Image (cartoon, coloured by chain):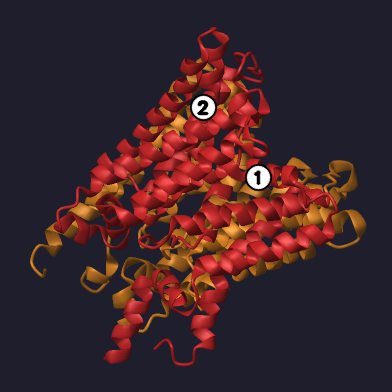
Chain colours: A red, B orange
């Protein structure tokens, strides 16, 4: 009877518990930090070009756009949902922005149009999920195709690159020395995200929804309203990432940000957020983004092709979730059952 | 709840019937709208192309359905297809003497092994399937590049027998479609008539009760992922020989279309619910739309937007219908 109960519990909570237990042994963030230092050392030894302030600044730029969306995605995944449509949203926002810029409208409107398009995409997702009760993975698979499809329908095989003067500031500008606008923006947003998630009632509610949506509703949390808001948030974040990415590249093509959804979700999971919801920290996500940036950049310096880098990323993702699970299952004798 | 079962059961049966009948009606409606206006659609060459394209989607969707029923999701099937396809194409290029049946068996074995890697991580370490297959998606896709060094295997490097198998025709229907029919029949038999098949439904429906009933739900997931992998491997050979080319990016992103076909066909993303007939119809629906768009004169750049609209709409309709008609076999009287 007793073992039966435990088995059911194990089956029901699955990996939600794994992270919790691993946390008792060692903090996830400490491990990430160690991995970052190791990779930093490896990069320094392997490439003579790595150890310079400007190179390290480039590391940040190469991953910041994904990291900004990852911050919002962390909220969504902690709340027990997922958004596969972010890559499509980035493309659609970039196209809207490109059209607004071509029409000759001023810079602030160009940027606002991308954020507004992201907001609209997020609202559609939120409506499907919170209102029409479509499971988020299914809904966003549909809207992913829809958003990118609209981008292709509008653009064809064309390219939009008539952006107003000063637009390149967002993706290519620096605040002081090698500290880029993108980096400052990410750090600022990261601090806000961390404060909201870990120190406000709203943050606690989001974690509660991810842990147990039914109990959360019973205890008076407007679950669907929060869910809707989170999808809007991730849409706006994708809009912002679209501004930065388009500004950095200097042009819009409908294939922009292709496959980014997987990289962004990988950063979030790597950061110790449980895919089952209810568990995760913003510090972990930020460190995971830094680690991913360092690994990608280090391999890039060694002329490793991008597709091979994705093998390393994929392996990292699995190892990072498998090791604590394996320790728990095989290492800590009698830990289970 | 002992009393309302008979009434509820009848309603549920009716709903399930209408879902598949409705989908079938929708496909017929699409055909009825397209065929008179665009007679080219009904040309044998076009119809056989439609069947061949859809056969690949049906194969993968039936495999994905098993995984979805077990409460998992497999994002790596298209990468599995690409890797297996590249391996058999490269083997054929290097050793044209290897018989095609041997290569097909090899493709099934490699695909099953790749699926079993997913399954083992999920079964033994209890990792969430979406995380595992997100990782193996990148790894398998990158492995295609490592195996091929980024080179393409073109049709002139493939032996005539390698290319010919899928094009053999029986009764006007290609071998590719017959293979899909055979796999669909086998999976339907597995789900309906074997103990493992019933256990798979039970494990996905109600894991807690399944454990009390003596079903190892982790093992059932392992089985589902391995079969899905084997089907992906088989589809890998079929894909490269049908399109007569193998390269790193083949079928990139196809996994999402496969999941869409399953959802449109009435498979529940939360496990335990799905029928082979529904999935076949779901895939056929997507296949007909995809095949008809260029004929109707929709620009290629608009096709993705239209597919997106169709998928999103179908998904909303289905997800809403599902709430009323979730079939839970463990709560039914003895079958």
Residue B47: horizontal and vertical position, in percent?
59, 33
Residue A92 image label: 2
- Are labels 2 and 1 on one chain? no
Q: Position of residue B276 (x, y in %)?
A: 44, 55
Left or right, B89 with respect to A80, comes to: right
Q: Could you tell me which secondary element the residue under label 2 belongs to?
A: helix
**Residue B226 vertical position relative to residue B313 in the rendered view, above or below:** below
Instruction: Give the SS element for disc 1.
Output: loop
Which residue is pictured at 78% across the width and 43% down the height? B244
Q: Residues within 10 Å of mark 2 (few under 14, many from 20)?
A: many
| Foreground residue among B194 and B173 | B194
Residue placed farthest to the front in the image?
A176
- Which residue sits at x=58%, y=64%? A32
Q: Nearer the viewer, mark 2 or mark 1?
A: 2
Chain ID of residue with mark 2: A
Task: Classify residue A130 by image quadrant.
Answer: top left
Residue picked out by circle 1: B251
- Residue at 57% across / 75% down in the picture? A323
Query: Local crowd at mark 1 within 10 Å, few (<14), some, or many (≥20)?
Result: some
Position of the C terminus of chain B by quadrant: bottom left
Determine whether B100 is above or below B309 in the image: below
Q: Is residue B96 visible?
A: no
How far apart marks 2 and 1 lie (CA) works out to: 23 Å
Comparing A206 with A150, the one in front is A206
| Residue B33 seen in render | yes
Image location of residue B246, percent across then percent down:
78, 46
Up-down: is A272 above or below A94?
A: below
Using the image as rendered, state which of residue A131 and residue B200 is in the foreground. A131
């Amino acid at each position: 009877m007793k073992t039966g109960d435990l088995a059911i519990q194990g089956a029901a909570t699955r990996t939600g518990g794994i992270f919790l237990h691993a946390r008792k042994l060692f903090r996830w963030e400490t491990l990430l930090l160690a991995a970052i230092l190791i990779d930093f050392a490896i990069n320094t030894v392997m490439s003579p070009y790595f150890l310079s302030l400007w190179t390290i600044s480039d590391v940040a730029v190469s991953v910041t756009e994904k990291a900004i969306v990852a911050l919002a995605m962390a909220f969504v995944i902690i709340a027990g949902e997922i958004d596969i449509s972010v890559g499509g949203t980035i493309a659609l926002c970039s196209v809207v922005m490109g059209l607004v810029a071509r029409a000759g409208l001023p810079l602030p409107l160009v940027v606002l149009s991308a954020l507004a398009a992201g907001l609209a995409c997020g609202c559609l997702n939120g409506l499907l999920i919170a209102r029409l009760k479509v499971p988020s993975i299914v809904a966003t698979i549909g809207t992913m195709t829809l958003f990118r499809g609209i981008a292709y329908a509008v653009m064809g095989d064309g390219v939009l690159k008539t952006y107003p003067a000063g637009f390149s500031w967002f993706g290519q500008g620096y605040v002081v020395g090698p500290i880029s606008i993108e980096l400052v923006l990410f750090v600022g947003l990261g601090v806000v995200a961390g404060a909201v998630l870990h120190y406000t009632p709203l943050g606690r509610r989001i974690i509660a929804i991810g842990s147990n949506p039914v109990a959360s509703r019973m205890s008076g949390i407007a679950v669907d309203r929060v869910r809707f808001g989170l999808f809007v948030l991730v849409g706006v974040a994708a809009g912002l990432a679209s501004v930065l990415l388009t500004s950095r590249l200097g042009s819009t093509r409908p294939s922009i940000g292709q496959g980014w959804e997987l990289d962004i979700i990988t950063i979030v999971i790597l950061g110790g957020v449980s895919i089952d919801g209810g568990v995760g920290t913003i510090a972990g996500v930020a460190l995971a983004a830094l680690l991913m940036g360092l690994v990608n950049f280090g391999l890039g310096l060694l002329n490793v092709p991008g597709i091979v880098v994705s093998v390393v990323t994929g392996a990292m993702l699995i190892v990072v979730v498998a090791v604590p699970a394996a320790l728990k299952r095989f290492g800590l004798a009698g830990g289970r059952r | 709840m002992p009393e309302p079962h008979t009434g509820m059961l009848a309603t549920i049966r009716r709903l399930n019937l209408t879902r598949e009948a409705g989908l079938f009606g929708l496909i017929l409606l699409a055909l009825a709208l397209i065929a008179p206006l665009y007679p080219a659609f009904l040309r044998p060459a076009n119809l056989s192309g439609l069947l061949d394209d859809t056969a690949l989607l049906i194969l993968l969707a039936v495999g994905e359905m098993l995984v979805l029923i077990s409460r998992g999701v497999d994002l790596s099937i298209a990468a599995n297809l690409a890797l297996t396809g590249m391996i058999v194409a490269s083997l054929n290029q290097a050793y044209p003497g290897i018989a095609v049946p041997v290569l097909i068996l090899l493709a099934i074995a490699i695909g099953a092994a790749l699926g079993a890697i997913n399954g083992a991580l999920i079964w033994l370490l209890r990792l969430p399937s979406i995380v595992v297959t997100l990782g193996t998606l990148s790894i398998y896709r990158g492995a295609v590049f490592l195996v091929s060094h980024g080179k393409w295997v073109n049709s002139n490097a493939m032996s005539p027998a390698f290319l010919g198998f899928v094009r053999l025709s029986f009764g006007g229907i290609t071998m590719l479609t017959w293979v899909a029919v055979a796999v669909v029949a086998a999976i339907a038999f597995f789900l309906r008539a074997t103990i493992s098949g019933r256990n798979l439904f039970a494990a996905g429906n109600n894991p807690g009760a399944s454990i009390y009933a003596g079903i190892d739900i982790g093992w059932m997931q392992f089985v589902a992922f391995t079969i899905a992998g084997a089907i992906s491997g088989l589809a890998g050979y079929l894909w490269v020989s049908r399109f007569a080319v193998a390269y790193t990016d083949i079928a990139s992103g196809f996994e999402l279309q496969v999941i869409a076909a399953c959802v449109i066909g009435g498979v529940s993303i939360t496990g335990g619910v799905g029928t082979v007939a529904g999935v076949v119809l779901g895939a056929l629906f997507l296949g007909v739309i995809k095949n008809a768009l260029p004929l109707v004169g929709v620009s290629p750049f608009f096709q993705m937007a239209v597919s997106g609209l169709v998928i999103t709409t179908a998904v909303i309709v289905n997800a809403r219908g599902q709430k009323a008609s979730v079939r839970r076999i463990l709560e039914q009287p003895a079958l």
